[in-house]
Amino acid sequence: MGVPSSVVEMSVAEYAVIALGGKQYRVREGERIVVDRIAAEPGESISPRVLATGSADGITDGGTVTAEVEEHVLGPKITVFTYRAKKDSKRKMGHRSHLSRVRITAIGG
């Protein structure tokens, strides 16, 4: 039968687990991710905190990851509607999250 292609691809590709903005992301080199707004200008390089790196050899602690901030964007509009039955109380609010699009440029073990 063999091994599924997704498993083979994953074991060959190098990846890293990084922490950005209080959240953890599993990334590969060349991948683009959308994270909470980062205090860096578009085009600037950043070095996020690396929790682990992995490859066909296994998982190791630490490592280095270099990423580039591509642009700052707004998330989708979220509408919040609060209604209290029989109280004639209604409130409609909404917001759009401030986000940054980041491209992973290099992963080093």
Image (spheres, helix red, strand yellow):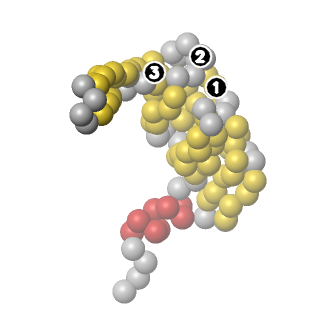
Residue drawn at 59 percent across, 16 percent down: 40
Tag 1–tag 3 contact (CB < 8 Å): no
Residue 90 on image: x %, y %: 27, 25
Q: Position of residue 34 (x, y in %)?
A: 45, 33
Q: Determine the residue positioned at 73% across, 57% down.
A: 60
Per the model, the C-alpha gap separating discs 1 and 2 is 8 Å
- Residue 3 as seen in the image, left or right of residue 66: left
Q: Is residue 102 visible?
A: no
- Single out the mark in the foreground, 1 or 3: 3
Residue 109 higher or lower than 69, as above or below: below
Q: Earlier in the sequence, mark 2 or mark 3?
A: 2
Q: Nearer the viewer, residue 83 or 12?
A: 83
Please tell me which residue is depicted at 37% across the width and 26% down the height of the picture: 75
Crowd class of label 1 (few under 14; some 14 to 19; many from 20; radius 10 Å): some
Specify which label sits upstream in the sequence, 1 or 3: 1
- Residue labelled with disc 3: 98
Label 2 to label 3, Cα distance in Å?
13 Å
Total marks shown come to 3
Which disc number belongs to residue 46?
A: 1
Quarter residue 68 falls in:
top right
Distance CA(mark 1)–CA(mark 3): 18 Å
Classify 107 as above or below 75: below
Tell me: 1 left or right of 109. left
Question: Where residue 49 sits in the image (x, y, percent)?
Answer: 70, 37
Q: Say above or below: 57 vs 101.
A: below
Mark closer to the observer (1, 2):
2
Q: Residue furthest front?
A: 86
Which residue is disc 2 drawn over?
40
Quarter of the image that includes the N terminus: bottom left
What's the amino acid at mark 2?
Ala
- Report if the CB atoms under discs 1 and 2 are less than 8 Å apart: yes
